[in-house]
Image (tube, rainbow, N blue to C red):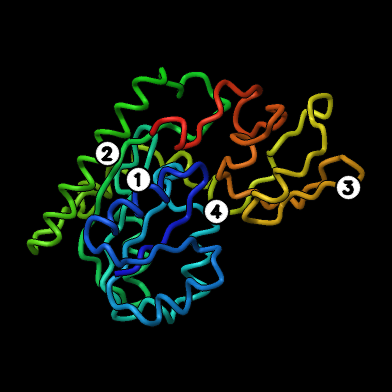
């Protein structure tokens, strides 16, 4: 087994590391940004994908990765983990259908509610203790899903027609367009920004450059919220106007 993930604040990374470790202590886990991920996939027949749902669909960076490497997925057996703050509908299914398009066999799916990574919307924020309980609940759910997969009866969350309808009518119908292209909505408060360069190092899209201590963008944001949740001065926003809480998985463990 090989785990593959894309993660903004660490939820999906944590989930797939725990899942693979429970299933096979020797399993390796790779980010899609890791230069070794292609070789690892080529050698392994069984894969576990984990990713954060955006508007009941797949972040563009992950969709591009899968489409650009479409020859890799033929005849692979894949289990999909979708992490979310609130609701995804068919989070596992939407990624599963994309992989099936390129010849993969989808074994099952798992939906995990986790601390919301959207740090600049107050309505999405929960108390610290509630987020810690969410993570504990997710851990139990992961372990149960591993037992089911090991027994040949994998969880089917997110797969099937009813889940697909929930994802489409719940979010994709109205908001699916937001992930069809990369975003140009990332905002920087220049009065707060100190030009430290942390956001530049973290950005998976090379969207951010620090030039003369000023942020320059390529308008290629994949909405992962890494920069927003790690900026030492909380100087960056995307959907909201002010950072309410910086959310990274380490806070809740």
Image mark for residue 168: 1
Vertical arrangement, residue 206 with respect to residue 14, above or below:
below
Image mark for residue 138: 2
Distance from the alpha carbon under mark 2 to that under mark 4: 29 Å
**Which of pointers 2 and 4 lies earlier in the amino acid sequence?**
2
Distance from the alpha carbon under mark 4 to that under mark 1: 15 Å
Label 3 secondary element:
strand
Closer to viewer: mark 4 or mark 3: 3
In front of the other: 138 or 59? 138
**Which of pointers 4 and 3 lies earlier in the amino acid sequence?**
4
Q: Which residue is mark 4?
A: 180
**Which of pointers 2 and 3 lies earlier in the amino acid sequence?**
2
Please name the residue shown 69% across and 51% down the image: 201
Please name the residue shown 31% across and 51% down the image: 18
x, y percentage for residue 45? 29, 78
Label 1 secondary element:
helix
Q: Are marks 2 and 3 in contact (CB under 8 Å)?
A: no
Which image quarter: residue 4?
Answer: bottom left
Please name the residue shown 88% across and 40% down the image: 213
Distance from the alpha carbon under mark 1 to that under mark 3: 41 Å
Q: Are marks 4 and 3 in contact (CB under 8 Å)?
A: no
Relative to residue 32, is residue 227 drawn left or right? right
Vertical arrangement, residue 154 with respect to residue 134, above or below:
below
Relative to residue 109, is residue 125 drawn left or right? right
Q: Which residue is mark 3?
A: 211
Image quadrant holding the C terminus, namely: top left
x, y percentage for residue 163? 24, 47
């Amino acid at each position: 087994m090989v785990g593959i993930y894309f993660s903004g604040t660490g939820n999906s990374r944590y989930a797939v590391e725990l899942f693979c470790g429970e299933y096979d202590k020797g399993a390796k886990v790779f980010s899609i940004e890791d230069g070794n991920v292609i070789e690892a996939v080529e050698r392994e027949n069984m894969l576990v994908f984990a990713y954060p749902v955006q508007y009941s669909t797949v972040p563009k960076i992950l969709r591009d990765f899968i489409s650009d490497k479409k020859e890799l997925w033929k005849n692979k057996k894949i289990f999909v983990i979708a992490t979310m703050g609130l609701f995804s509908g068919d989070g596992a299914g939407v990624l599963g259908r994309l992989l099936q398009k390129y010849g993969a066999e989808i074994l099952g799916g798992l939906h995990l509610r986790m601390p919301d990574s959207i740090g600049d919307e107050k309505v999405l924020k929960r108390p610290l203790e509630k987020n810690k309980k969410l993570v504990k609940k997710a851990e139990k759910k992961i372990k149960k899903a591993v037992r089911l997969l090991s027994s040949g009866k994998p969880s089917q969350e997110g797969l099937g027609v009813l889940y697909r309808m929930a994802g489409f009518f719940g979010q994709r119908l109205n908001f699916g367009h937001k992930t069809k292209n990369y975003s140009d909505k990332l905002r920087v408060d220049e009065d707060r920004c100190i030009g430290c360069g942390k956001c530049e190092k973290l950005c998976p899209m090379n969207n951010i450059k620090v030039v003369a201590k000023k942020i320059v963008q390529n308008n290629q944001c994949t909405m992962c919220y890494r920069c927003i949740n790690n900026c030492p001065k909380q100087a960056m926003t995307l959907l909201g106007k002010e950072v309410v809480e910086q959310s990274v998985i380490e806070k809740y463990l």
